[in-house]
Structure formats: structure tokens, C-alpha cells
Amino acid sequence: MNAMITKLDSSQADFKQRLDTLLAFEASTDDAIENAVSGILADVKQRGDAAVLEYTNRFDRIPNGGATSIAALEISQEEMQAALAAIPDAQRKALEVAAHRVRVFHERQKQELNGFTYTEPDGTVLGQRVTPLDRVGIYVPGGKAAYPSSVLMNAIPAHVAGVEEIIMVVPTPDGVKNQMVLAAAAIAGVTRVITIGGAQAVAALAHGTETIQAVDKIVGPGNAYVASAKRRVFGVVGIDMIAGPSEILIVADGTTDPDWVAMDLFSQAEHDELAQAILLCPDADYIAKVEASIEKLLPQMPRQEVIRTSLGDRGALIKVRDMDEACAIANSIAAEHLEISAVEPQQWADKIRHAGAMFLGRFSSESLGDYCCGPNHVLPTSRTARFSSPLGVYDFQKRSSIIYVSEAGAQTLGKVAAELAYGEGLQAHARSAELRIK
């Protein structure tokens, strides 16, 4: 067991090289998947509903001879409300609390994103208008992986942004519908739910069919086929991101119960074998305690084999010189989830520039953020937190510039524009500006 997780020391000469190797992840492109996705996208674009039905019946094994229309695969508002009423009280209350907190956070976010205008002395008015997208598509995984929390995190900010139509697609292999997913859709304000998945669902959302209107943007996680399809339709529609494996980075000062830290590492490692869990700490004795906790607690985990593989292949316990160095390394890693498990976490958080979400203090476990804290759990992975952000209201809005040039303003700006236009050899541009000059 001692060799299960990599142990590194920042003082080692080859530390940076070994860390880079550990962090390296590039989404593999399987030629078979790419070719299959390309064919499905083209087929759905050409044949519409017929192609979607054919692939859905084949891949999701729809019972009773398969569906004969998209209408047979659509979940009504009444069925969603029935699911909400039918799930156990504890589940319903948990969904409602989580949804309320997610909505409150994103309502506050929206307040900070309102447009603006300002008037210059000559009467020229400049500004920015913020408007919501008309229609978005939300992909929700189905089958063994059912994530009602992802329904809340994807749909609620779209709803808060003012998106009028939210179309959710979710595969239902063997015709099995997850009631919590449908209940979450009811709570989150989803407009339509269609039980299709895979590349064919992405194609239907991007290009539209006889019964499914094309959307402006597609968000939500999926398997390799879904990721490939989203990548290929980008430009026809917007997408949120191409998500990589889950990640957690814990910066610890050695004061948190080591069992807590070990379990926090497990919380991401259990997602899949490619997930990454790393601890940075200046206390070698504490690192040894966390390692002992890993050995003690792992046999109790139902997904222990997945955790074992994840920690063995991509996990690490890293001894650093001090907490300042830990923060510097954390900025280099730019993790999806960053826990700062320390007595005074804010002083270290002030040094962090790159992280999808920061969890401050020993009681702020990443798992709380996944479900019910309020900030979005759709976060940048694979070091992309260096340049991208959590999913938010802003992902469902667009901005239009407002330009009202007064007569007086045209006299000044026209001369500037004409001079630049002549310099670029665009005479019509220049004359268009000059005609407005007295």
C-alpha cells in the first residue's frame, strides 16, 4: 500500500519535471469514436428526427420495440412534477434547499453583470447591453451515472439569466428514468426534457430537427462521444467547455484531521481512474499521517478499486518548503477544486490566482460545493483555470455594444476615423465618416 500514491518533495532536483509528468493530461482522440461521431452528426443534420430515433433506439435499447416518434421520448411537465411529488421527502427537501442556494448565488452574480451606459460631454452615448440567449441545451448523463445536482447547476443559472427555453436531453438506457433527475428538472425550471443522448442528441440540439429547435449553446458533461460531438459543433453553437477528469488539490498546514483530508482526496479519486488528487503540505509528519489514513480508510470505500487506480496513477503527496511555496505550486497546477485546509486560510487564498473554486478552512469540504453551497460546480479542469471560469449566469448572456454618436461627436470622431481609414486604404469608410462632418 505504501507505494500506492506518489510522494514528492519540492526540494528534489527533478521535482518540476516529475510534477509536470503527473499533471500531464491530454484528452485522447480515438479515431473510431471521431469517425462514428462525424457520421452521426452528418446523419442527424440530414435526416433529422428519423436519425435521432434510429440511434436512440439502437444505443439506449428502448423497450417495446423502440420509440416511433420524438414525442414518445419527451417528458411532460406533468411527469416532471409527478416525479418531484413521488421522490422521498428527504430527497425532495435536499433538492429544494440546494436549488434555492444555487439560485440565490446566481441571482447575486447577475446583479454584478448588468449593462451600462455613459454620456460624453458632446452628447455621445456609449455603453453595453446585456441580453440572455434565446434557447440553450443541457446535456445530462443517464444510465449508471445520474446527476440531479448537474441539472440544478446547469439549468438554474440559465433560468436566472433569462433564457426563455431550456431543453434538457438525457439518455434513458433500457427505458429507465431517474426520478431525482426529473424532479431536479422540475425545480430548476427546465422547459423541455427529451430522453435522447449521445452524439445524436448533441447533433439535434446544434442543427435542429423537425421537432427539436436548434439551440444557441450546449452545456453539460458527457462521455467521449458527447465531448467529441460538442467539440465538432462548436462554432455552429456555443459550448461551455470540454471537461477533463475531476481534480482536487489540497493545501494543508497540518492542523486538519488527516482522516478528513484523506477522505477529501477520495472524494475526487472515486469519480474515475483518470481523476487527480494531490496534497501539498510543509509538514512531513502530517503527510505520513494522511498516508496512514488513506491505508486505513480505503478498504471501507465501495469504489476502492477506482480510488486505488486514480491515486496510484495520478495522485501525489507533496512535501513543500512552506505554505508560500505551496501556494506558488497551486498556481502552477491551477486545479479545478482547491481546498486550503489551514487555520487562517484567507491569508493563503490571497496568494492564489488560478483555481476553479477555492474551499477555505477545514470545514469546507469540496463535496459541499458539489451539491449545495450555491456556487457552480461546473468548473475548468486540466489547468484551464488559468484562463477560464466556473459556469455562471454570464455563460447564458451575450453583450451588445451601444453607440449613439451626437452631431458634435461626429465632427471629432469623423476626422479620426477618416484619417485611419485612408491609412488602411478603405476610402468608402473614410468618406462615410467625412460626409457627416460639417
Image (cartoon, rainbow, N blue to C red):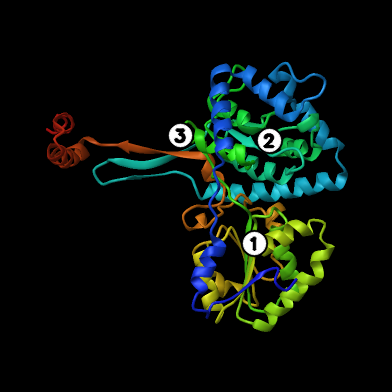
Residue 351 visible in the picture:
no
Which dot marks residue 20? none
Residue 106, horizontal then vertical, whole percent = 60, 48
Check disc 2: other Cα within 10 Å, few if <14, some if 14-19, many if 20+: some
Amino acid type shown at disc 1: Asp
Residue situated in front as seen by the camera: 302 or 136? 302
Kindly identify which residue carries mark 2: 189
What is the secondary structure assignment of the residue under circle 2?
A: loop
**The image quarter in which residue 123 lies:** top left
- Compare marks 3 and 2 and give the one earlier in the sequence: 2
Query: What is the tally of numbered marks visible in this picture?
Result: 3
Amino acid type shown at disc 2: Gly
- Compare marks 2 and 1 and give the one earlier in the sequence: 2
- Compare marks 3 and 1 and give the one earlier in the sequence: 3
Camera-near label (3 vs 2) is 3
Residue 159, horizontal then vertical, whole percent = 62, 38
Which dot marks residue 235? 3
437 left or right of 406 in image: left
Camera-near label (3 vs 1) is 1
Amino acid type shown at disc 3: Gly
Q: Residue at x 32, y 40 (%)?
A: 125
Mark pair 3, 1: CA separation:
35 Å
Q: Residue at x 68, y 56 (%)?
A: 369
Check disc 3: other Cα within 10 Å, few if <14, some if 14-19, many if 20+: few
What is the secondary structure assignment of the residue under circle 1?
A: helix
Residue situated in front as seen by the camera: 305 or 139? 305
392 left or right of 124 in image: right
238 left or right of 318 in image: left
